[in-house]
Amino acid sequence: MNKSFITNVIALVLLVAGYVTGNTVVLYAGLFAFSGAVTNWLAIHMLFEKVPGLYGSGVIPARFEEFKLAIKTLMMQQFFTQTNIDRFLNKEMAGENSLNLKPVIEKIDLHPAFDSLVEVISNSSFGGMLAMFGGAEALEPLKAPFVEKMQESIIEISQSDTVKQALKEQLESPQMMEEIQQNIENIIDQRLNELTPKMVKEIVQAMIKQHLGWLVVWGGIFGGIIGVISASIL
């Protein structure tokens, strides 16, 4: 049983008990507590569900597009600003946290580079001499060592301060910063376009409905207090 249900049951019990016993204080406490709890419960329900005849109900699904725009605006203006992106890049490029390109370089296929080198040699003045020793096929055993050494050299170069500084300056350039923001915005748009009104309703409902249940509880409590005061005055 949730908080809303328990509050309504207690209010109803007080209402019935006051009516049966003729106790005005208990009757009014139960009546006002029940009305306060039910009113707040209905208000919470109307946030998520359309109630026929009640204008403004189902506001979250009805304002679906505005809700998506608000999420996008929040993400772009609060999280992915140029200042925050620049701060992130500075952190990534500093000291031990410097950008590590090794995993990327290791995935690059450098075999075409070796093939191009062989082609250049074959078409140069050394081509005739190479043909005497079996042509391009004679260099094939060198392909694996060449690729390995080339990867090691590129990784070593990528970790130099000069390359890091050049990469940092390029990433922080206005054009690159705009491109990064545009790519982030496109990703957000793509994800938001996958959302449906039902999904948005469920997301918001899961986030706040549990906490909104306390509105029903406090509505019942304050309603009961007002009922007791009203009975005392009357």
Image: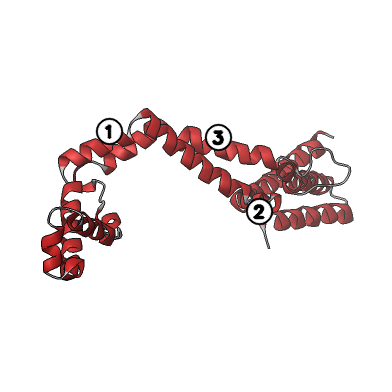
Q: Secondary structure at mark 1?
A: helix
Three-letter code for the amino acid on which mark 3 is drawn: Thr
136 or 50, which is in the foreground?
136
Question: Disc 1 marks which residue?
Answer: 169
Q: Earlier in the sequence, mark 3 or mark 1?
A: 3
Q: Are marks 3 and 1 in contact (CB under 8 Å)?
A: no
Location of the N terminus by quadrant is bottom right
215 or 144, which is in the foreground?
144
Scheme of colours in the image:
secondary structure
Question: Disc 3 marks which residue?
Answer: 73
Three-letter code for the amino acid on which mark 1 is drawn: Glu
Residue at 30% x, 55% y: name it.
104
Toward which corner of the image does residue 170 lie, by quadrant? Answer: top left
Label 2: few (<14), some (14–19) or many (≥20) C-alpha neighbours in 10 Å: few
Q: Earlier in the sequence, mark 2 or mark 3?
A: 3
123 or 5, which is in the foreground?
123
Q: Are marks 2 and 1 in contact (CB under 8 Å)?
A: no
Q: Secondary structure at mark 2?
A: helix
Judged left or right of residue 73, residue 37 is right
Three-letter code for the amino acid on which mark 2 is drawn: Met
Q: Nearer the viewer, mark 2 or mark 1?
A: 1
Where residue 65 appears, x then y in whole percent? Answer: 68, 40
Q: Above or below — where is 9 with respect to 93? A: below
Residue 199 numbered tag: 2
Q: Earlier in the sequence, mark 2 or mark 1?
A: 1
Label 3: few (<14), some (14–19) or many (≥20) C-alpha neighbours in 10 Å: few
Toward which corner of the image does residue 3 lie, by quadrant? Answer: bottom right
Q: Secondary structure at mark 3?
A: helix
Q: Nearer the viewer, mark 3 or mark 1?
A: 1
Toward which corner of the image does residue 54 lie, by quadrant? Answer: top right
Give me the C-alpha separation between circle 2 and circle 1: 41 Å
Give me the C-alpha separation between circle 2 and circle 3: 19 Å
